[in-house]
Image (cartoon, rainbow, N blue to C red):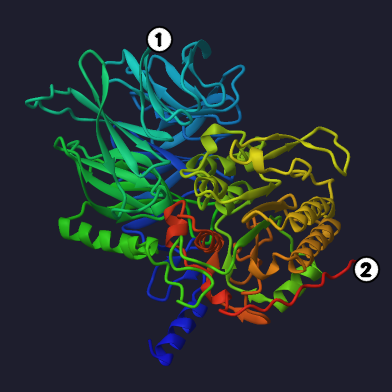
Amino acid sequence: MSAGLALAAILALAQEQVGPLAGGGYLLNSGWRLRPAGRQVTLDTLPMATALAPDGKHLLVLNGGYNPPSISVLDAAAGREIGRAAVADGWLGLALAPKGDRVYVGGGSQAAVFEFSFAGGKLAAERTFAVAGASFIGDVALSPGGRLIYAADLYNDSIAVINPQSGMVIERLKTGRRPYRILFHPDGQSFFVSSWADGAVLHHEAETGKLLGRLRLGPHPTDMVWGSGLAAEEDKPAIPRRLFVAAANTNNVYSIGVTESKELRLVEVINVSMTPRQPAGMTPSGLALSADLKRLYVVCSDANAVAVADVSEAQSRVLGFIPAGWYPTAARVLRSGTLVVLNGRSPGRIKTGTAQFVAPFTEAELDAYTRTVFENSPYRDEKLLDAGTPKDSPVPARPGDPSPIEHVVYIIEGSSSKVMPNHHKLAREWVLLDNFYVNAEAGADGRQWSTAAIASDYVQKLWPNSFRRGRLNDHQGEEPAATPPAGYIWTNAAAAGVSMRNYGHFVANRPQAAAGGTQVLVVRDSTLAPVTNLYFRGADANYPDVERAKVFLKDLAEFEKTGQMPRLILMRLGNEHTMEAPAAADNDQALGLIVEALTRSQFWPATAIFVAEGGAQNGPDHVDWRRSPAFVISPYARRRTVDSTMYNTTAMLRTMELILGLRPMTHFDAGARPMASVFQPGADRRPYTAVQPH
């Protein structure tokens, strides 16, 4: 490449920022682009479910995220919102009575089902059906004929059966862990439940709840739809009906055959990856079928796309992809053939979502849509073999190639906009990253983005509701359904035989423990348990980060004695929220002490320290509210320079993976740009001197 072309490429990267694109579309903080097909209608917070009126004239949408929940009423033909009704709480569950005159909403943290009357396109609140002992009500379904309401009690792993005439819960039916979707068999005598945490679909008798069958599939089964059957073949009997199930922690949709005797068997796995070697990350979490049951639409949340599959024959074929908005959650086909996609977010307006109306399309139009989806994605299979770093870079172009950096220290901090002298000095002495973005929106999803290169669908769908309406944070090993597709960076490192030491990740503190040498109570991850320092206290706003730093420095002294330091050190500093001045100063001092000690250790010549925030909580700046401080500190990191290349959390993870010889965890880190421009071929071993507090 000529010097002129190289300079042009560098300038192009330097000019790349999150926001609207000159040629149309929007560049996200993940590095993916949005150019949705069709027409967007702005809704409210995290729309996740639809219900179509029996006459087909009105489409209801449940908004259940960060803002106060609501039901939007859309004119299906005109594709516009004509009304909205407030709901005390709502999440996923939305069902219409057979006559279309009653609407039922799963009440989330209110532990109830809410009833609305519906007439002339207008909703009116009616009764509230309390579910005693429930923790969180998600999906709701009506038995055929509408005689009974079945409501998923998410954290009690059960289905509450409500008689709408009396308003009473008449039965509690035990099911799999974290019941997500409820779907009745067409005969009304049984129903299916997708178990979010068990990776299975359960089949229950409707009247008694008796378990008729259980079929294990992939992790995180979510949406389900009924499809047509299959004719008999030479070695296979006919199947009257098929049940399609999306598994969000995979790139797959599962086709289940249901015989006349209601036996279940796996018929087919439909892979919706865009390329042959694509890692997990498509997140298929919503399904819809065309009126003739020949086309299956698969909502791929983390690809901002909808896969279109021909399911008319025994072997299904993915025909192409439709570009969606940001984090699509559900889809429905209207009588006109128009596809409606719910998108959980809008660029620049994280608290609102959209309904996307895509008119019936030709084969040529689908081909054009597919090209757009591929262009929107930064992932390419060839990046698995060559990440694109220069030959003389300390960051290898492929995992397993040598690097002069042997030790990686990864520190995840809380957010702060306060004056922090050590942070400022580190940015001056090494590389000032002025175009770095976190992939997350808050600390809740940030913990997963920072350690797993994705936030699982459980986290994405529940943290906005939890954040606003009081559920405890359960995303740090407490909740089985929160697990991301490939585990965490420490899962990856353990599989590759990389030595580790953990400070503060996935630990629970002893109640009322005094500062200084008190062990934590529990390590919530079996991989981390053997490598965790049990004296490094977990999140606790009343415990100083300087005390945490002292625990690490004690370990570092032992490493110096033995001459051996783990290749990967994982550390949490701060409590991952916007810190007030005293806490910010304490955090700043702790980071300064840690960096100073490492730069003066025998391991410094072969060490790189990566520091990033867990979530975006400082508030918006003039570019984007997810723009965030980040640091790369190493003898091989450039000194006293500004780097305006657009990087993000997954770019940092990809860089560490390449140094340590780890494969990427998802298509986000696999497609991310390694932070090669931060590094230099030669080493500058000058140590750091921490700024002391005044």
- Residue indicated by mark 2: 694
Residue at the limit of the structure toward the front, as seen here? 562
Q: Where the C terminus falls, by quadrant?
A: bottom right
Which circle, 1 or 2, is nearer the viewer? 2
Label 2 sits on a secondary structure element that is: loop
Estimate the x, y position of residue 468 in percent, counting from the top left.
64, 42
Is any atom of residue 628 visible in this view? yes
Q: Give the left or right position of residue 609, taking residue 107 as reference.
A: right
Q: Give the left or right position of residue 354, taking residue 418 as reference.
A: left
Estimate the x, y position of residue 286 in percent, counting from the top left.
37, 40
Q: Give the left or right position of residue 59, taking residue 613 as reference.
A: left
> Residue drawn at (42%, 76%), measured in percent from left and top?
22
99 vs 192, nearest the viewer: 192
- Residue indicated by mark 1: 210
Label 1 sits on a secondary structure element that is: loop
Q: Amino acid at mark 2?
A: His
> Residue drawn at (34%, 32%), measured in percent from left and top?
224
Estimate the x, y position of residue 31 in percent, counting from the top left.
46, 64
